[in-house]
Image (cartoon, helix red, strand yellow):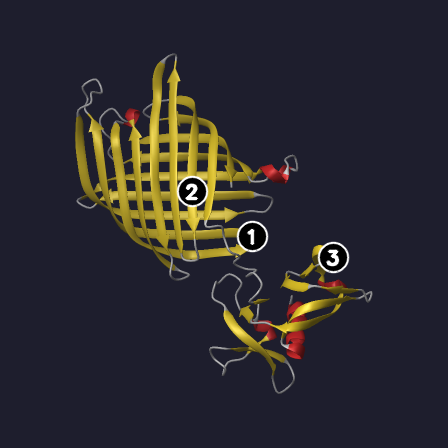
Amino acid sequence: MKKILSMFAAACLASGAMADTITTVTDDVINGTVTEINGGMVTIDTAFAGTIKIDREKIKAIDYDSESTIFVRTDASVREKMEVSVSRDAEGNIVFIPVADKQQALALDEVSTLWTKEGEDPDFPPVKLWAFSASLGLTGHEGSTSDISVSAYLDAVRSTEHTTLKLYATMNKARSEGVKTSEQYIGGLDFEHRPADKWSWYFRDEAQHNRFNDYKLRNVAGAGAGYYFWNNTIDGRNSLLRFRFGLAHTYTGHYTKKAMSDDCVTDSDIALDFGLLFHYDFTNGISWNTELTYTPLVDDLDKGTLVHESKLSYLLKELGLVSDKLSDISLEAGVRNEYQTRPEPGMNHTDTTWYLRLSKSW
């Protein structure tokens, strides 16, 4: 990588420009536009063969003939970047001079990534504004009821550089021998604004109808601050650990105990809002996601709801058995626990839902 940066900087010094010609070690000449230098490979767009990737070890020289702005990053895991110009120190070594602070000079071994303004940031590539996924699978439930059924899940995520909005909905409804054994609907949104690498603020709202948990309607709306212990993307694989803390308003409309009539008794309380999210992408298309939320009541800290969900996903394209059009289908296995510290009479402390489903993203 350091050899690549050295070659790139030397070419910029010679011409202050972007690459147009590559000469290989066999003296072949390739004309085009270099769009990326990263990870030991050079990418050049040509008129005769489209986009070509060439191993750095097979390149003798790169010549440039158009001016370009250069960006560098000293830590590939931190989004902050610097616009620089290329120069040499008194000993003739290549150095990078930040445009915002010309008194500072970065040595070559201090730079982890280098790219041009016309190119794409190799560490933090742009994301789609909207991403969607839909899942259908087998669901099992243990707690106030016991059953196996089919469930559906939908979500839509809008992401920009500093904000993320997630909308989601899930349904689980089952009958056994003509008798309804499960009826659960959950929908919500989660909005987060992240002005800095470590800190963020959020607003979330989740509504739930679960007849067999005695919920005619249960709604939790929370807001507060978030802190990222880490959030790294390396070679397209992401890992993060985020903690949230804030206040929430909880509303619960209970069915009365008279044969599940339409009469409703309501509870409305202010609660604390705590959350923990852990995500890790392994190699070979495997990822792990765990999320915890806990909302104890402010005026009765012994009463609260803890929700836990863990999910393991596997991209089917890693099996080599699906076409490119189906490469975004994954197999998911997970479990969701909802724990009530003081449940209503006749209800269990914990309701557990497990699922096995296929998910498609687009």
Disc 3 or disc 2, which is closer to the eye? Answer: 3
Q: Residues within 10 Å of mark 2 (few under 14, many from 20)?
A: some
- Farthest front residue? 47
- Farthest right residue? 26
| Secondary element at tag 1 | loop
Q: Amino acid at mark 2?
A: Ala
Q: Amino acid at mark 1?
A: Gly
Disc 3 or disc 1, which is closer to the eye? Answer: 3
Residue at position x 54%, y 37% in the image? 330
Query: With respect to residue 162, does 352 lie above or below?
Result: above
Question: Which residue is labeled 3 in the image?
Answer: 48
Question: Which residue is labeled 2 in the image?
Answer: 156
Residue at position x 17%, y 33% in the image? 266
Q: Quadrant of residue 342?
A: top left
Q: Position of residue 311 (x, y in %)?
A: 46, 39
Asked if marks 3 and 2 touch (Cβ < 8 Å), the reply is no
Q: Position of residue 271 (x, y in %)?
A: 23, 45
Asked if marks 3 and 1 touch (Cβ < 8 Å), the reply is no
Observer-nearest residue: 52 or 320? 52
Question: Which residue is labeled 1 in the image?
Answer: 236
* Left or right: 222, with 228 as reference point: left
